[in-house]
Image: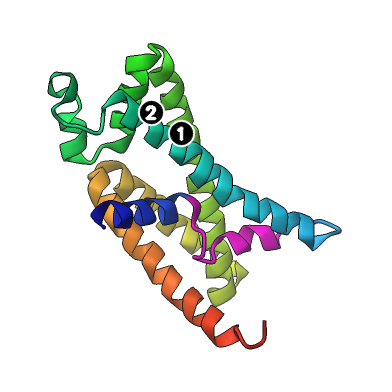
Amino acid sequence: VGVLIQGFKRAAFSNEAGVGSAAIAHSAAKTPYAVREGIVALLEPFIDTVIVCTMTALVIVISGAYDPTSHGGMYATYISEGNGAGLTSAAFGQQISWFPYMLSVAVVLFAFSTMISWSYYGERCWAFLFGDGSSLVYRLIFVGFVFIGSIVDAKNILDFSDLMILGMAFPNILGVLLLSGGV
């Protein structure tokens, strides 16, 4: 059950399915057919969770990196610290020597694209609540949190992110339930 809960938490963090935030980006798309954008929206969680996360998990399991006692305990530090990126890098590096470098580039690009998308989501919501003229205030707050995120422990950031995603999911689920009759 614990592994299942952890999997749901990481899946919600990685693809935000059911949280309602992706609709902000998809609503800004200019397309003649809304169904096409809906298909794109359906593919995102599939590619992210089913393909990328499953491949990562399979490499970690097949290489034995999930076991802190395997390979002379070389993975124990990553597991005890909750350093998933380090564990993934070590597991892939055990099989393909150059892969940790490629993974480092991918992690930086994913982190940067995540900051861009969450900045956009937050700014659109801020503009809706306080008007377009106050976007500079949001940007300064966002930059402040980016700095704080760079000096805080990764576990604390993940715990805080999980809490905030849960905070977004509750109103979204409530809205879905209240509007289910209309749908």
Q: Mark yes or no: residue 60 visible.
A: yes
Question: How far from the left and from the top, in percent, is residue 116?
Answer: 53, 47
The residue beneath circle 2 is: 59
**Lateral position of residue 102 relative to residue 127, left or right:** left
**Three-letter amino acid code at the position of disc 2:** Val
Q: Is residue 41 above or below residue 66?
A: below
The N terminus: image quadrant: bottom left
Question: How far from the left and from the top, in percent, is residue 166?
Answer: 38, 67
The residue beneath circle 1 is: 55
Q: Nearer the viewer, residue 146 or 15?
A: 15
Question: How far from the left and from the top, in percent, is residue 93?
Answer: 35, 17
Q: How many numbered tags mark residues here?
A: 2
Q: Is residue 151 above or below residue 70?
A: below
Q: Residue at x 31, y 57 (%)?
A: 5
* Magenta run includes residue 28: yes
Please provide the residue range marked out in magenta.
15-30
Q: Colour mode?
A: rainbow
Q: Is residue 6 above or below residue 183?
A: above
The C terminus: image quadrant: bottom right
Q: Is residue 43 above or below residue 92?
A: below
Tell me how far mark 1 sits from mark 2, CA to CA. 6 Å
**Three-letter amino acid code at the position of disc 1:** Met
Question: How far from the left and from the top, in percent, is residue 37?
Answer: 73, 56
**Lateral position of residue 137 relative to residue 42, left or right:** left
Is there CB contact under 8 Å for labels 1 and 2? yes
Q: Mark yes or no: residue 152 visible.
A: no
Secondary structure type for disc 1? helix
Mark 1 residue crowding within 10 angstroms, few (<14) / some (14–19) / many (20+): few
Mark 2 residue crowding within 10 angstroms, few (<14) / some (14–19) / many (20+): some
